[in-house]
Image (spheres, rainbow, N blue to C red):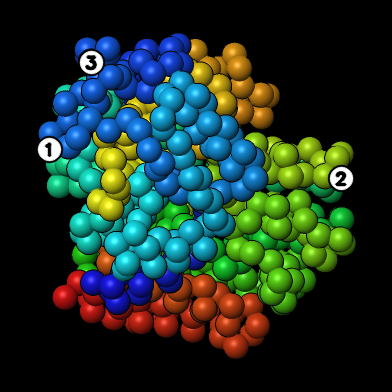
Amino acid sequence: MKKKLAVILAASTMAASLAACGGSGSSGGTEAAGTAGNKETTAQTGGGAPAQEAGGEGLLTVAWWGNQTRNERTQAALDKYSELNPGVSFDGQFSEWSDYWNKLATAAAGHSLPDVLQMDYAYLDQYVTNNLLVDLTPYIEDGTLNVDDCSQDIIGSGSVGGKVYSIPIGINAPAMVYNKTITAQAGVEIKDNMTLDEFVEVSKKIYQETGCKTNMAYGVSQEILQAMIRGYDGHVLFDNGKLGVDSAEEFIPFFKVYEEGVKEGWYIEPGVFAELTPGSIEQDPLVYGSSPETMSWVAFCWSNQFAAFNNAAPEGMELDLTTWPSKDPKLSNFLKPAQLFSVSVDSKDPVTGARLIDYWTNSLDCNQILLAERGVPISSKVAEELAPSLSESDQKVISFINEVVTPNSSQINPPYPNGSSEVSDLINKLEEKVCYGELTAEEAAEQLFTEGNKIMAEKAK
């Protein structure tokens, strides 16, 4: 299993990725950390979680990926929990996206996973299949983990085989964050639900008028290709033991952006990324760079990252957000459970782990610290109570999700199966070859179709 985990998880290079459960949202004390039908009992004894000691004291490790904004807010929320629950302390461990999954793969192989870990929808099935996560269903049933005010669809997104293994911390959606200062300078108005052709035309005009280039998502492109494929009659990138497309033709428009963009000068050259960390907001060309040749007017990311981009942006840069371009936006757009949290099978105190997730879900005090950085809170009660405390950019994200994405979206794809990480790695390698002129878009599409299907078939065995 060690070898299998290292292969499945360490290859990950996807874009970094995100609101409705209940309880005493306005309470921030021990009661909020263990809200349940019998709150007093739950807070003091752990709610009688089956086959576990009461828990409630000791040091727990909590791991997540993210940017500096997330790191500071998460640690502050953990510190608040410790203040409200004397005897419980946390070793907060954070990493950049790619490093995070490499570290988890190593920890999983050595049976030393963190007590509580941030999980992504794309990897949930793989971690459950490898028996690495605790089934949270008993803690929900006994009230240790209260989901009364949560959408069951959202809770279901953290389930595998009818059992709950992860609780989302928020609701998220794909978002294209762009430099409104640059688009205004270029005389370009960005509209929601653009097609890919419209996006390319906008990119060309911005380059002509300002010299500023485009970055669709060099090195972290699987999610963008996945969204594009959804625009073809609702196809999926990954199916059972194969790719979910009819032919290589569906991949060509994706690779054409890189091929034509680099040749014509409006796409950032791949050499710029040699010393940048993929997925790092602080190093994203949207907010990082010394000249138009090294800067992008746009970043493809997730709606919950909008606040972090605003924090990282230099003074005088105004940012806004819209949808990813697509052939059919209604088919491509989707709402995603944001950055789920799980308790690992290696945890020495899963009861307190479940209580911590309950605290993140149901405590207004906690969410006034987190401030929806991971997405709109899944507790409808907490989301409503939190709204007045949010910044203008966070309220803009809520409007984006509710008014732009939700009316024009479809059901999220199932969690990625085995083989998806290897295909993701293949996509990035082919993309790089296209950027360096070693392959045409058509050749890259054909290789992805042929080799991707081979990988998926092999991993399904």
- Residue at the disc numbered 3: 41
Q: Residues within 10 Å of mark 1 (few under 14, many from 20)?
A: few
Instruction: Locate residue 181 relative to residue 421 in the image: left or right.
Output: right
Displayed quadrant of residue 21: top left
Displayed quadrant of residue 139: top left
Q: Nearer the viewer, residue 367 or 278?
A: 367
Q: Is residue 412 above or below residue 369?
A: below
SS of the residue at dot 3?
helix
Which quadrant: the N terminus?
bottom left
Tag 1: amino acid? Ala
Residue 15: percent from the left, percent from the top?
A: 52, 57
The answer to whether marks 1 and 3 mark residues whose Cβ atoms lie closer than 8 Å is no
SS of the residue at dot 2?
helix
Q: CA distance from mark 1 to mark 3?
A: 17 Å
The residue positioned 28% from the left and 81% from the top of the image is: 454
Mark 1 or 2, nearer chain start: 1
The outermost residue toward the bottom is 438
Q: Is residue 387 above or below residue 166?
A: above
Residue 51 got which mark?
1
Residue 185 got which mark?
2
Q: Is residue 415 above or below residue 265?
A: above
Q: Nearer the viewer, residue 65 or 377?
A: 65
Q: Nearer the viewer, mark 1 or mark 2?
A: 1
Tag 2: amino acid? Gln
Q: Is residue 362 visible?
A: no
Mark 2 or 3, nearer chain start: 3
Q: CA distance from mark 1 to mark 2?
A: 63 Å
Mark 1 or 3, nearer chain start: 3
The residue positioned 35% from the left and 56% from the top of the image is: 113
Residue 79: percent from the left, percent from the top?
A: 53, 31
The residue positioned 59% from the left and 43% from the top of the image is: 71
